[in-house]
Image: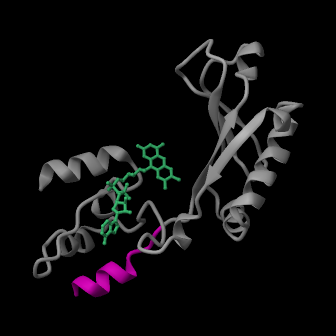
Amino acid sequence: MFQRQLVARPRGSLGKIALQMRERFWEQEGIYGGISWTSQDIGQIQYPSHGFGLRKGIVVGGYYLQPGPQARFNQMSAAERLTAAVQQGEKLHPGYGAQVENGISVAWHRMNHMLGCTARDTSTETLRVLRQAEGCHYLIGDQISAHAGWMEAAVLSAHDC
Ligand SMILES: Cc1cc2nc3c(=O)[nH]c(=O)nc-3n(C[C@H](O)[C@H](O)[C@H](O)COP(=O)(O)OP(=O)(O)OC[C@H]3O[C@@H](n4cnc5c(N)ncnc54)[C@H](O)[C@@H]3O)c2cc1C
């Protein structure tokens, strides 16, 4: 039962793309934190709400929550994801690409031993089974919480143990 519930547990395939920028150019545009929303696949650009006035900064250059963009981004290589994120960001901020120093993204559902994120099934029965030890095998973390996909759930799970 434990193994069946574990394998069957549906997991999300969303992702984020982090971009390290040479300069905090958005602050010159009067942006201090917050999000720019776009209908492009990147979905949004998130600006840091800390470190105001410093030279460099890291933006979330993409946070794809919808199935279509997820499928398109997840089949790309990491380099292709960065290129796509830069091209789409250019439409919001001309000159964006020239500011990118480095970037990282992960296709979580393709990562061995992860196979996804933000577990989708929060049924009480599934959680009841997975929260019980199977022999000496214990599970903790946000993936077996009813609030999957949030750090809060991971912390609460640790407290619960
Ligand atoms: C794209 C994305 C965006 C997110 N955005 C937010 C957000 O904005 N706000 C928020 O609150 N939360 C967010 N989250 C969720 C947050 O990242 C998770 O809730 C949190 O990281 C879960 O912590 P955890 O300790 O349960 O698991 P993890 O952080 O997954 O840690 C588990 C660790 O166990 C290791 N591990 C696995 N198997 C083994 C093994 N057999 N032996 C040893 N080690 C092993 C893994 O390598 C990993 O390091 C996001 C998640 C994703 C994927």
The quadrant of the rendered image in which ligand 1 is seen is bottom left
Q: Which residue is drawn at 25% across and 46% down?
A: 155
Q: Where is residue 64 in the image (x, y as percent from the top left)?
A: 64, 53
Q: How is the image coloured?
A: one colour
Q: Where is residue 20 in the image (x, y as percent from the top left)?
A: 66, 36
Q: Residue at x 69, y 43 (%)?
A: 102
Q: Which of 132 and 136 is in front in this view?
A: 136
Q: Where is residue 31 in the image (x, y as percent from the top left)?
A: 69, 18
Residue 15 lies in what quarter of the image?
bottom right
Q: Is residue 123 magenta?
A: no
Q: Nearer the viewer, residue 38 or 125?
A: 38
- Quarter of the image where the N terminus is located: bottom left
Q: Residue at x 32, y 79 (%)?
A: 6
Residue bounds of the magenta highlight: 1-11
Q: In this view, does 4 lie above or below 41?
A: below
Answer whether residue 141 is visible to the viewer in this image: yes
- Quarter of the image where the C terminus is located: bottom left
Q: Residue at x 85, y 46 (%)?
A: 87
Answer whether residue 63 is visible to the viewer in this image: no
Q: Is residue 152 above or below residue 114?
A: above
Left or right: where 152 falls relative to 132: right
Residue 75 lies in what quarter of the image?
bottom right
Left or right: where 8 falls relative to 16: left
Q: Nearer the viewer, residue 127 or 76?
A: 76
Dominant SS of magenta comes to helix
Q: Is residue 152 above or below residue 124?
A: above
Left or right: where 48 falls relative to 73: left
